Amino acid sequence: IAIENELRYAIDHNQISVYLQPKYNMVNGELIGAESLARWNHCTQGMIAPNIFIPLAEEIGEIDRLEKNMIKEVCGILSTWKKKGKRIHQTSINISLPTLLHDGFINFVSHTLVENKIDGTFLEFEITERIVMKYEVEVNSRLQQLRNMGIEISIDDFGTGYSSLSYLYKLEVDRLKIDKMFVDQCVENSEVVSTIISMAKALGLQVIAEGVEDEDQIRILKKLGCIEAQGFYFSRPVPHGEFEQLLEEYSTAD
Ligand code: G
Ligand code: G
Ligand code: MN
Ligand code: NA
């Protein structure tokens, strides 16, 4: 069978699952949230990487269904944890342009939140800098509607594209995610990271470092005023059952 059909089948039959990578406050060590990442557990080929099936889903026009399933799954997981009396955290979902612009997307999101009794503030959508660079009024109006529901918007892989300051200024976003590429270099050369952090401050945006792998990077990032981070130093993306154990470890009595 062609991989395209297998992917369609996988999306229809919930064979794409949610992995969660925790995000931390580097100053007090608290768990502050998670990023959800899609995983395709193929029945014969095992785990297929998103770098392969996400572009494919875009090509065959199925990305909006895949990402809407991710939103449903994430809200379902958060709702289950809430019912169990666990403290839940803001969880981000990567959203591509076709999904953001899909008819009925806003209604779908608001319906899914209500259905699961989850407040919008528990969701964050990550959009890539490519979407930002293609600035369109339509994109910004969608972002505004999402933010009106309390959902935060962040720009993923920030610094790898060339989004202009004027777009960033006008755009309805909350946070920049400093791309791993710059975090990788920050011990040898902290100029780029430092510039991104200052720029975020000047624009009133929050900032998070991605792909943090060691303590030297943490030291530099903190010194430059970046508080939030995610990366293999803390944890890889894990199945939600494993993430639930992190909730136990990090839940504070309140
Ligand atoms: O999970 P991993 O670190 O291998 O992710 C590889 C890439 O796939 C990353 O760029 C990540 O943002 C992307 N990705 C994972 N899940 C999704 C998804 O549901 N939607 C989109 N658009 N990208 C995703
Ligand atoms: O594009 P996006 O930021 O969504 O990509 C997330 C991807 O980065 C996932 O594939 C995730 O597994 C990967 N990732 C997250 N943290 C680290 C890290 O510390 N090191 C490396 N090499 N990859 C990471
Ligand atoms: Mn991301
Ligand atoms: Na990224």
Image (cartoon, rainbow, N blue to C red):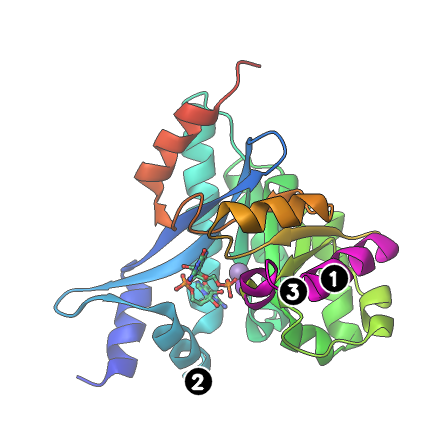
Give the CA distance from mark 2 to mark 3.
38 Å
Task: Identify the residue at the far front of this view.
Answer: 188
Q: Dividing the image into 4 quarters, which one contains the C terminus?
A: top right
| Magenta span of residues | 181-203
Q: Is mark 1 within 8 Å of ligand 4?
A: no
Q: Residues within 10 Å of mark 1 (few under 14, many from 20)?
A: some
**Of the two numbered discs 2 and 1 in the rendering, the one whose residue sits closer to the viewer:** 1
Q: Is residue 85 above or below residue 120?
A: above
Regarding residue 104, the answer to whether it shows in the image is: no
Q: Is mark 3 within 8 Å of ligand 2?
A: no
Residue identifier under label 2: 59
Say which quarter of the image contains residue 133. Answer: bottom right
| Sequence-wise first label, 2 or 3 | 2
Residue identifier under label 3: 189
Q: Nearer the viewer, residue 193 or 55?
A: 193
Q: Amino acid at mark 3?
A: Asn
Magenta region includes residue 45: no
| Sequence-wise first label, 2 or 1 | 2
Q: Amino acid at mark 1?
A: Ile
